[in-house]
Amino acid sequence: MPSMTKTWNLETKTEHLTHLAHSVKTEAQTALLVAPLADVLTTAEAALADKKRLRLAQLDALCKLNALDRKLDVQAAALSTGARQAERINPALRVLGSLFPDGVAAVTKYSGRGVETQLQLLKGVLTSTDGMPEAAVLAPTIAELRATVTAAEAALAELQAIDDQVEANDRHCDDVAERVYNAYYATKGELTKIFLNNRRFIATFFLN
């Protein structure tokens, strides 16, 4: 006799319940079982549609953040290079060591959601330049970096908000999967009653 396993994901469970709903619709004796299945399937399909929509939104937001991360890396490197060049022109300046004491790579090594750490480090760098007259020659590069930091913070906040929605949807999908599982076995029980536990006959209603 076919069965549904609790560990199956919602997509697979929904496919099996959809097949069962169509199966019971084909017989006059079992048509009354369609309505309760339809209600569960409507909820399951909505949850799965939300899951797909949120996953696409999550991927899109992550790609936007990664693009800004690449821009941050380039601009931080440009700031480091500019500081080094300024010190060559005026050896008395001590800009580079003040801004990137561990080197620029120690700041730009983060990626993905780890960009949050990079942003905090770069904000510290920008704060340092505010009270540093020696950094005046780097003003255009600093301004560009500051604008990108602001944009990246907004992109990260957007991604984190979508992450929260994805987690909520995952919990909802787990709850719906339980409903699908229960509906499947409730229907199986009704078929057992209708067809007097004719296991071979009942098995034809289920997706193998």
Image (cartoon, rainbow, N blue to C red):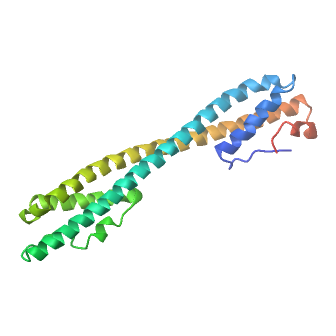
Position of the N terminus by quadrant: top right
Residue 92 vertical placement versus 149 (above, below): below
Q: Give the residue drawn at x 46%, y 41%.
A: 165
The quarter holding residue 77 reads bottom left
Residue 82: x, y in percent?
Answer: 18, 67
The quarter holding residue 29 reads top right
On the picture, is 8 further left or further right than 203?
left
Residue 161: x, y in percent?
Answer: 40, 43
Q: Nearer the viewer, residue 95 or 131?
A: 95
Q: Give the residue drawn at x 71%, y 26%.
A: 36
Q: Nearer the viewer, residue 172 or 72?
A: 72
Q: Give the residue drawn at x 75%, y 40%.
A: 16
Residue 98 vertical placement versus 66 (above, below): below
Residue 7: x, y in percent?
Answer: 68, 50
Q: Nearer the viewer, residue 67 or 175?
A: 67
- Decide if residue 48 is in sight here: yes
Position of the C terminus by quadrant: top right
